Image: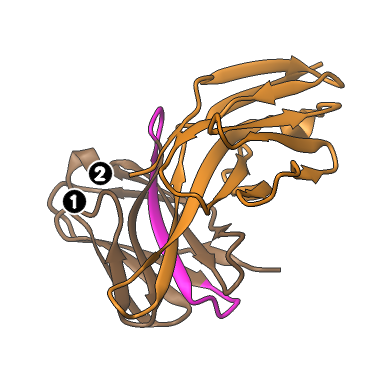
């Protein structure tokens, strides 16, 4: 089975802190994605990566950056966390099959 | 840009009954894919069912089936014989491919806002 893991289930940070959210997948998938999920807004794509060191902006990239140095790992970085970045963050990966994205359990980030 | 609309924020159904979740989308594309994802209270999102736009036949996966109306841009999910384990958030999603500046193609999902389904005894 495909497994997508995220470094933390719950995270509390202070405004202005630099925050790293880590995602690891174990199925050699080329594509990886970061979403944020907010009530009433569904999932919105922040960034995605289709190969090592390659990245593309999603629909809401402002205030975020990403890093993909190894194929299995995709990091989301909040350079200076703000309260409006309090949210659930979901990572996903997808292989050569175009049909399915596999999701991690999510990280609930609270910025105080 | 594509948009996906789920007009039912919450729904409730009794165990063993049938329920239909609505989804409409807006696109000018002719070739695309549609999905229903389920997110149980434990938060791990899983794929329920998919539909290729070029296929006229509606997809079916056990108790889950879709009603795909391409002209109407409608993609509803029917859950038959509802079970307590079907309690979850359900997201409709749209996907298409696009070219990445000569480096290949990529695809991304656009999600609706979700429908919270509660299955009761």
- Per the image, the residue denoted by label 1 is A81
Residue B41, label in figure:
none
Q: Is residue A91 above or below residue A97?
A: above
User: Which color was chain A given?
Assistant: brown
The chain painted orange is: B
User: How far is mark 2 from mark 1, CA to CA?
Assistant: 7 Å
Query: Dot 2, crowdedness within 10 Å: few (<14), some or many (≥20)?
Result: some
- Per the image, the residue denoted by label 2 is A85
Q: Residue at x 18, y 52 (%)?
A: A62
Query: Dot 1, crowdedness within 10 Å: few (<14), some or many (≥20)?
Result: many
Are the numbered discs 2 and 1 placed on the same chain, yes or no? yes
Report if the CB atoms under discs 2 and 1 are less than 8 Å apart.
Answer: yes
Name the secondary structure under disc 2.
helix
Q: Considering depth in this image, is B106 or A56 the residue closer to the camera?
A: B106
Question: Which stretch appears magenta?
Answer: A25-41
Q: Considering depth in this image, is A76 or B32 the residue closer to the camera?
A: B32
Q: Considering depth in this image, is A101 or B107 the residue closer to the camera?
A: B107
Is B54 magenta? The answer is no
């Amino acid at each position: 089975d495909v497994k997508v893991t995220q470094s933390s289930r719950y995270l509390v940070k202070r405004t202005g802190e630099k925050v790293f959210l880590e995602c690891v997948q174990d199925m050699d998938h080329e594509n990886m994605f970061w979403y944020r999920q907010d009530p009433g807004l569904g999932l919105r794509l922040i960034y995605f990566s289709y190969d090592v060191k390659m990245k593309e902006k999603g629909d809401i990239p402002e205030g975020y950056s990403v890093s993909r140095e190894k194929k299995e790992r995709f990091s989301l970085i909040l350079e200076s966390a703000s309260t409006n970045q309090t949210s659930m963050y979901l990572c996903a990966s997808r292989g050569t099959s175009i049909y399915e994205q596999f999701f991690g359990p999510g990280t609930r980030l609270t910025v105080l | 840009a594509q948009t996906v609309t789920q007009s039912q924020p919450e729904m409730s159904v009794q165990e063993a009954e049938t329920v239909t979740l609505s989804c409409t989308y807006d696109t000018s594309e002719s070739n695309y894919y549609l999905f229903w994802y389920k997110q149980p209270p434990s938060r791990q999102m899983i794929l329920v069912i998919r539909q290729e736009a070029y296929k006229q036949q509606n997809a079916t996966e056990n108790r889950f089936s879709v009603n795909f109306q391409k002209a109407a841009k409608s993609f509803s999910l029917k859950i038959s014989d509802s079970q307590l384990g079907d309690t979850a958030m359900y997201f409709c999603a749209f996907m298409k491919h696009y070219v990445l500046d000569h480096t290949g193609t990529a695809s991304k999902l656009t999600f609706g806002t979700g429908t919270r389904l509660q299955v009761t005894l």
